[in-house]
Image (spheres, rainbow, N blue to C red):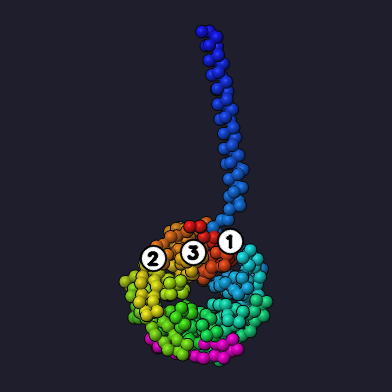
Amino acid sequence: MRFRTFLNVESLSRLISWLFRLMSLLLMGYLVISLVINPLISSLTPKPFTEFKWPDKATSSPAKIIAGPDGALWVTTIATDGDNQIGRITTQGKITLFSVPAADNLAEITSGPDGALWFTERLAGKIGRITPQGKTTEFSPGDPNLELDDITTGPDGALWVAGRDSNTDCKILRLTPQGKITRFDVPHSIAMLENIIAGPDGAIWFTADRFSSSSMTSMIGRITMQGKVTLFDVRTPSLIWGMVAGPDGMIWFTAGVESSSGKKIERGMIGRISMQGKITEFAGPKYGAVSITVGPDGAFWFTERLPSNNDPSKIGRMTLKGLMTEFAAPFSLYNPGDGIVTEPDGTLWFTNVNAIVRLTPPRP
């Protein structure tokens, strides 16, 4: 009996020793995973938001961004020291700046039908062209009082531009790559034209603002290649900030819904309009969505207006069914309203103050 008891005590001692060694190994493994492996995995995993700082030598800050024909991103800028510039940024974050001999701040930019980039000079009333190598050319419509805004490439291989003259008469210009300009009038009730895009129906679509006695609201317009204009009312009084052609054959837009007094934006809205003019509205982000694009997942991605009350800046996503998701940025987005674009590698890009931001969407 004593011999058996001795064996039991010895076995128990060995068992305790074995358990202690096992716990030590588990603890060591936990520390290795926590202090070494997890940080290594984290460093190798792409972060959703990556910010590329604008060069210190720049005399301008980034504004509108588009995807260029050369696989890079192209950016118009707001001059801060009298020198207008257009920026080019590769998907690796390398930024090159080209000086533009423009008399006024640059407005919008688009990828042209000829492999070059085309842009507008807002108050100078000129249209510019820049090659991927940085060579610039200017075209003048002949009216120094013409104010130009957005620009897009049409299905006819020409550039289409939204603008207005000194009498606030709105015009849509058609410019061939060779420099021939044709003007089309928009009804006098319209005070301002802004967004302009090529629609899926072979026409050009645009947003039109009109003033009432107490506020300004937006309409959506359509112009054919022959210059016939049709205007559609948006059911809810609002200001439209962005447009994009959707994968469903419709035009989608972002807007801020006005309060009953017409003096402030009450909430955000995202809408779609069919080619026949039927409008469907979806609830948008609290502070309003601005620029919008079709993402790599077939959903719509958009920038949001700068929040108040120290709420985090966000980028939003909406499905074709109107389901919305928001992603908080790790830094403040002070200027996210000047375009958001999708690159072939599935990343999204937009501008911030003195920076370009890349967003890698989470995998579904």
SS of the residue under disc 3: loop
Query: In whole angstroms, how far apart are the C-alphas of marks 2 and 3?
Result: 14 Å
SS of the residue under disc 2: loop
Kindly identify which residue carries mark 3. Answer: 297
Amino acid at pointer 1: Glu
Residue 56 seen from this side: no
Q: Is 210 in the magenta? A: no
Q: Which mark is residue 321?
A: 2
Badge 2 crowding class, 10 Å Cα cut-off, few under 14, some 14 to 19, many 20 or more, is few
SS of the residue under disc 1: strand
Kindly identify which residue carries mark 1. Answer: 51
Write the start and end of the magenta stretch as one range: 174-189
Q: Nearer the viewer, residue 202 or 75?
A: 202
Q: Position of residue 160 (x, y in %)?
A: 51, 84
First of labels 1, 2 by sequence position: 1
Q: Position of residue 61 (x, y in %)?
A: 59, 70
Query: In whole angstroms, how far apart are the C-alphas of marks 1 and 2?
Result: 31 Å
